[in-house]
Image: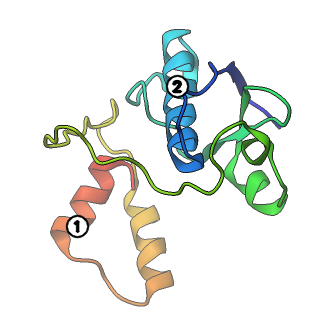
Amino acid sequence: YARAAAEIADPPQGFGVDELRLTDYVSANAAMAAAGHELWDTIPAVATPHGWTWHHVSGGRRMELVPVEVKALLRHHGGLATTDVDQDRRGTRPLQETRPAHFRLPKGAVAVSEQQIQGVEEDLGYRLPGAYRSFLKAAGG
């Protein structure tokens, strides 16, 4: 099921499991973007493509990009649980400096169609506010 794979460097000393998960995902995304992988053509280099997630392969530092549905259905005790980091340390360290986040819009004019928005509204049972509908269409959902 893997669409891509990346080898990630060993974690720094003192990392907890949540810090490792976050930095591994960002590192794998950056590696795939730098390699010119087609899934990173329209998204920021550190973002994971919509509908995909990273899986830590047990026994090493290999990450595989798999469909989110596959990972959700196949519950497992994955490679992250066997990595040499502090498994009891949770959360991440506070940012040393904060700054506003700026999101780029997708290359296409509309990333989410009107039909998709209407489908979500049907599932929710009510119409979303106009400004939020516009945001969802432009930002990709």
Give percent across and percent down for residue 73: 81, 62
Q: Left or right: 26 with respect to 62? A: left
Mark 2: secondary structure: helix
Task: Classify 58 as above or below 133.
Answer: above
Work out which quarter of the rendered image holds the N terminus and state it.
top right
Task: Classify 34 as above or below 124.
Answer: above
Give percent across and percent down for residue 141: 39, 56
What's the mark number on residue 97? none
Q: In the rendered view, how is the structure colored?
A: rainbow
Q: Left or right: 27 with respect to 42? A: right
- Which corner quadrant of the image does residue 66 belong to? top right
In front: 131, or 87? Answer: 87
> Label 2: which residue?
27
Residue at x 14%, y 40% (from the top left corner): 99
> Label 1: which residue?
132
In front: 121, or 89? Answer: 89
Amino acid type shown at disc 1 = Tyr
Mark 1: secondary structure: helix
In front: 141, or 72? Answer: 72
Task: Classify 58 as above or below 139.
Answer: above
Residue at x 52%, y 25% (from the top left corner): 27
Q: Residues within 10 Å of mark 2 (few under 14, many from 20)?
A: many
